[in-house]
Image (cartoon, coloured by chain):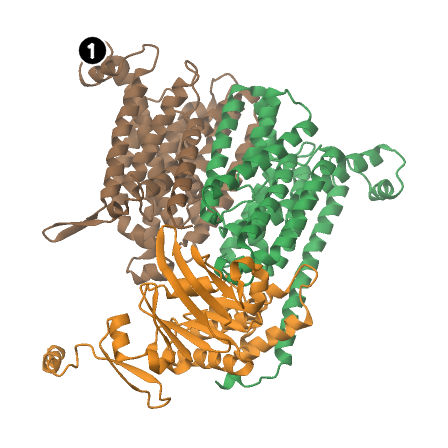
Amino acid sequence: MRLQAIDVKLGYGDRTIVNGLDLGIEAGTVTTIIGPNGCGKSTLLRALGRLLKPMGGQVLLDGKRIDQTATKEVAKILGILPQAPTAPEGLTVADLVARGRHPHQSWYRQWSSDDESAVAEALDMTGLLDLAERPLDELSGGQRQRAWISMALAQGTDLLLLDEPTTFLDLAHQVEVLELVRRLHGQAGRTIVMVLHDLNLAARYADRLVAMRDGRVVAAGAPHEVLTEELLLQVFDLDAKVIPDPVAGTPLVVPIGTRHLPDRGTAAKETVST
Amino acid sequence: MNAKTAARSVARPLRVSTMSWLLRPRALLVALTSAAALFLLMALNMRIGDIPMTLADVVAATFGDTQNTFIIMELRLPRALAGALIGAALALSGAITQAIARNPLASPDVLGVTQGASVTVVAAIVFSGTAYGGASGLLATLGIPVLGLLGGLAGAVIVYAFAWRRGLEGYRLVLVGIGIAAVFTNLKYWLLTVGDVHDSSRAMVWITGSLHARGWEHVVPVALALAVLLPAALLGTRSLGALRFGDDTVTGLGVRMNRARSAMLLIAVLLAAVATASAGPVAFVALAAPQIALRLAGTAQPPLVVSALVGAVLTAGADLVARTLFSPAELPVGVVTAVLGAPYLIYLLVRIRRERRT
Amino acid sequence: MSALATVARPPAKERLGALRRRRILALGGLTAALAVGVVLSIAIGAKPVPPADIWQALTAPTGSEHDIVVRSLRIPRTALGILAGIALGVAGALMQGHTRNPLADPGLLGVTQGAGFAMVLSIMVFDMTSLHSYIWFGLAGALLASAGVFALGTIGGKATATPVTLALAGTAVSAFLYALTSALVLLNEQAMDVFRFWQSGSIAARGEEVAWQVLPFIAAGLLLALANAPGLNTLSLGEDVARSLGQNVTATRAVGLVATTLLTGAAVAACGAVAFVGLMVPHMVRPLAGPDNRWLLPYSGLLGAAMVLFADVIGRVVAMPGELEVGVVLALIGAPFFVALVRRRKPVRL
């Protein structure tokens, strides 16, 4: 168990969002947390990455309480990329990625050869070597997201938490980022925890899904165990069919909606034609 | 006015046939409370003077014809009104400026108005004053209010001219504004060191902001300015709300950016210039009143009417303190506005931090 | 996906080197500007001193009149100018970085007005007349005001104060103290007389002692500031990213604000209200340094010192045989330059 939440209570101020939640993350797995907006996914991820201090319970990293470990030590083991991070204007990709080396630096060790090679490697893995000198604000959304992931990579941790790494990206770029995530997992056996909104991609790229609703874990397990029609109804209030993905064989969610229901099909067509 | 009753800050729609507005009950409550406080403060203020009166005397003299009517109508009422109106005008100007600049630290100071007026008036006092309160030259011909008005407008024109570059961007305006304000401020400081120390002291009173011996001739211009510009500002509120967002969003929302910004800017400049001409750049009202108002009303940006009322209350309250504290001597009102306003703003900051998520 | 295949590395590395060379070049340029400022500041003054005599005064003083002018007037004045300029430039960059507000001047946390108020108070209450004694009061006032603002900003919360809260609290406290100061100087013309000269800012006639008085504070402030630069870099990516990179956000903010206070407090206590230079300078060097504070801070310090010296020299020359105060010249010449810069290029947002 790399990362463990034990009976955690999370929230902001007086507002409790997650109460009494338990979750364990196995070493060397890709885990994806899914759930409707506001269910506490990001809150949980922030707590796992010690960005949010639990109001109750505890988070263990490699068996040690994360809030009692020096934050710089944690930063050498665990990297977390928050949702939609912002950078100052004019920051280049290389500069951004270099800042990922921060936990490994000190006043007498500002830029070692380790730093140099880690940054080059991170840029290489994310295919950004040619863009290294470009300012971040000139890049496309997909490139920018890769740059941030590259920064987290340069940090050199084998545990990565990514909060919605595919927001604002088109489908092709979403696939590109997730392929990258998968490759990071494959190469060094990194443990990865993500929050994703796209259920089909989540099923495709995760070893393990965690479905949340109202601050509780409703189901956790392999994608085909979790993504069932009953669960979609229970977690998302969504009527859907689940069929095998023709490419990967993983579950594929097809929402039913109202437009194509057999009894309303004609009505829908009429509305379109008028 | 507990911030915890968040539900009250939610806007409610008010619809009359095809017209519809959003009413904010909490802002309304704050506005009514401020208005009540303003009347009370003005009445209290009018009691003070060589002939002390009771509140009843004041009310009777204001609305009837008593032996005190002359004193009230010709001396005390204009002064009390001047304080309230000047405070309102400055606060309104500040609220608009902060919305345009998208920066809570902005005030008409960055529009060049207050500093332009200050430097003109200080120069006039220092170069043509006669050390013991007399005046000669330009100062005698034009008088301080006109000089202040001209100086303020000239300052604003300079800032605007330098900030305009293929359009008007809030960020550039603010940076240019502080650059130019720094020139004026330091010119002012330098003039204060050049002049005779008595003249400098006199100039210091004006640049702090004072309501001493203000009469109807000071009230009328500010009242006229508010009567015209407050409705104009309210009409522009919609675009002001949009201006809070980035330029791309603003254009997306269908607001013609440069024109909207310039128009609102003009309103802010005129309000600040007229108010400053009448009483000097009364310190801190323009910056603090909108920030206090938005925290009381629980809105995202400074609400215009509430800001104006809070500004009026702040100035009227400060004038009352300025006159009573060392009575019969009186302090310039600009000294007291900050002494009263700053702790209150800090209290609001602290209280809201406690309530909100940390 | 093809971009992800192994790409030849050398070109990228070479380009990284080019950036570094450009930065070092700019560093050299700023240092040279400062050196010119130092030479001018020692060479030019109300009393013309031939270069040979200046050289003699520096290397082998004999106690002649020229030696005294150079050694006891011009050198201390130049030293103080360098110290104050570096302090304010660095403090300005730190303050803008921590508050992410381009309007933040290094005196934002009440430092300038705290110093001014304490000095006026000491003149009135203790009848202080010598500059050396009321500098201590100014410094104490600056530190107290800033501590007060920070305490107010963090009251009731275990979490750090947000930059906006701090900036507003600082502005409010500044206005409060300035109001009290105005009230005092309006009641007392002697205090007014001292205050108006302090307010316009000057490094003249301070003597060697003043430079030594503020040196320890500025040195400590600079050390803290440089130590703070990498942390500030991570903070500029947002607090969450900073934390995930192992940075203690609260400690970083606190160190940055303590450094700013030490630097600004010492500078304004010694030279008066010249904090504006600290607001201008970071905007001027930001296009050169980029968003990396490890470069931005030294650049700001160097340019700050150079500007103070140049402004001081100009103030001595234009009003011969009298002088214009350095603060006035800084604003009159520096501000238009600043405005031109802001107009010419799109200002870099924080």
Look at the image and tell me whether residue B258 can be seen.
Answer: no
> Which color is chain A depicted in?
orange
Foreground residue, A137 or B34?
Answer: B34
Q: Residue furthest bottom?
A: A246
Look at the image and tell me whether residue B227 can be seen.
Answer: yes
* Left or right: B8, with C35 as reference point: left
Residue type at mark 1: give it.
Answer: Thr
Judging from the image, mark 1 belongs to the subunit labelled B
Q: Which residue is disc 1 drawn over?
A: B66
A84 above or below A256?
above
* Left or right: C40, with B187 as reference point: right
Q: Percent from the top left, x then y, of residue A134?
A: 53, 71
Q: In what quadrant of the picture does the N terminus of chain B appear? A: top left
A2 above or below B229?
below
Foreground residue, B306 or A215?
Answer: A215
Give the total of numbered labels: 1
Name which residue lies at 32% across and 20% down: B45
> Looking at the rendering, which quadrant does residue B344 occupy?
top left
Name which residue lies at 24% across and 71% down: A237
> Looking at the rendering, which quadrant does residue C105 occupy?
top right
* Left or right: B324, with B188 as reference point: left
Q: Percent from the top left, x then y, of residue C325?
A: 63, 35
Q: Percent from the top left, x then y, of residue B215?
A: 32, 21
Name which residue lies at 66% across and 34% down: C323
> Which color is chain B depicted in?
brown
B99 above or below B216?
below
Name which residue lies at 11% across and 77% down: A271
Q: Residues within 10 Å of mark 1 (few under 14, many from 20)?
A: few
Foreground residue, A34 or B313?
Answer: A34
| Chain in green (letter) | C
Foreground residue, B166 or A107?
Answer: A107
